[in-house]
Every structure is written in C-alpha cells, then in structure tokens.
Amino acid sequence: MSSIQIARIIVSFSWIYHGLFPKLVHIAPLEKQMTASFGFSAEYSYLITKAAGVGEVLFSITLFVFYRHKPLVVLNILALLGLLGFVAIMQPQLLIETFNPVTTNISLIALSVILLSEKQHSN
C-alpha cells in the first residue's frame, strides 16, 4: 500500500471515528465540556454535538472519495488548525492531557501534507 493510500485512510478514519464515537454513538464528557464552554444550554449542546458528529462523518466520506482534490485537503488542514486553536483558547488545559489535540492534529496535518504532495506528483 502506498504512503498516499495510508494517509488517505488514516485521515478519513480519524474524522469518521471522532464523528461517530464521542459524538453520535455516545457523547463523551469532554465533548459536552467543549460545547458547554460556549454557554449553550444542555439541550443545544447536545444538538450541536450531534450535528458536529454528522458533519465529521460526512466530511470523512467526502475526503476519502475526493482526497485528490487539493482545496478539500487544504480545508482539512485548516479545520484541524481551527479545532486546535479552539481548544487552545477555550480549554487550554486539554493541550497537556494524554492523547491531546496537539499530537493528534499535527499528525493528521502531516498526513494531509502527504496527500497534497500526491496531487503535485500526479500532474
């Protein structure tokens, strides 16, 4: 399996996993904490979390299928940076926890850069 395909699978898997399990199958306490940090009621936080989960699953499928579309991969990188920035501002203590968004997002960004390099090589 090529490095491009490995990057494609891992980045897509990460989005689908983070959409399904901590948001759709079971709302993780950390997800509740993140949406509550905006000051939403418990009901709105629940709906926002579920919607985010659906969005992440749909994005995962889209990215898996259209991984050669450079703007989509760039959007992925920007989303990962944005989510990391959100955590840094709203819940900075999470940046030093085990399996934190720093290591996760930077790794996924690096894999996304591999996908971008594939686009340049295929032309």
Image (tube, rainbow, N blue to C red):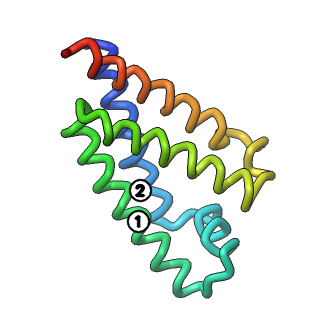
Query: Any mark on residue 19, and which?
Result: 2
Coordinates of residue 49 in the picture (x, y in percent): 49, 70
Residue 100 falls left or right of residue 67? right
Q: Secondary structure at mark 1?
A: helix
Query: Any mark on residue 119, and which?
Result: none
Instruction: Look at 36% across and 39% down and name the residue there.
Output: 13
The amino acid type found where label 1 is placed reads Leu
Residue 83 falls left or right of residue 51? right
Q: Are marks 1 and 2 in contact (CB under 8 Å)?
A: yes
Residue 22 falls left or right of residue 69? right
Q: Quadrant of the C terminus?
A: top left
The residue closer to the viewer here, 46 or 108, is 108
Instruction: Look at 58% across and 32% down and name the residue there.
Output: 106
Residue 28 lies, with reference to residue 88, above or below; the image says below
Instruction: Look at 49% across and 44% down and name the residue there.
Output: 78
Q: Is residue 18 in view from this perspective?
A: yes
The residue closer to the viewer here, 28 or 56, is 56
Separation of disc 1 and disc 2 at Cα?
7 Å
Instruction: Look at 59% across and 84% down and name the residue there.
Output: 42
Which of the 4 quarters of the picture holds residue 58? Answer: bottom left
Residue 92 lies, with reference to residue 1, above or below; the image says below
Which of the 4 quarters of the picture holds residue 72? Answer: top left
Q: Is residue 25 in view from this perspective?
A: no
Residue 20 lies, with reference to residue 49, above or below; the image says above
Coordinates of residue 84 in the picture (x, y in percent): 62, 47
Query: Any mark on residue 24, and which?
Result: 1
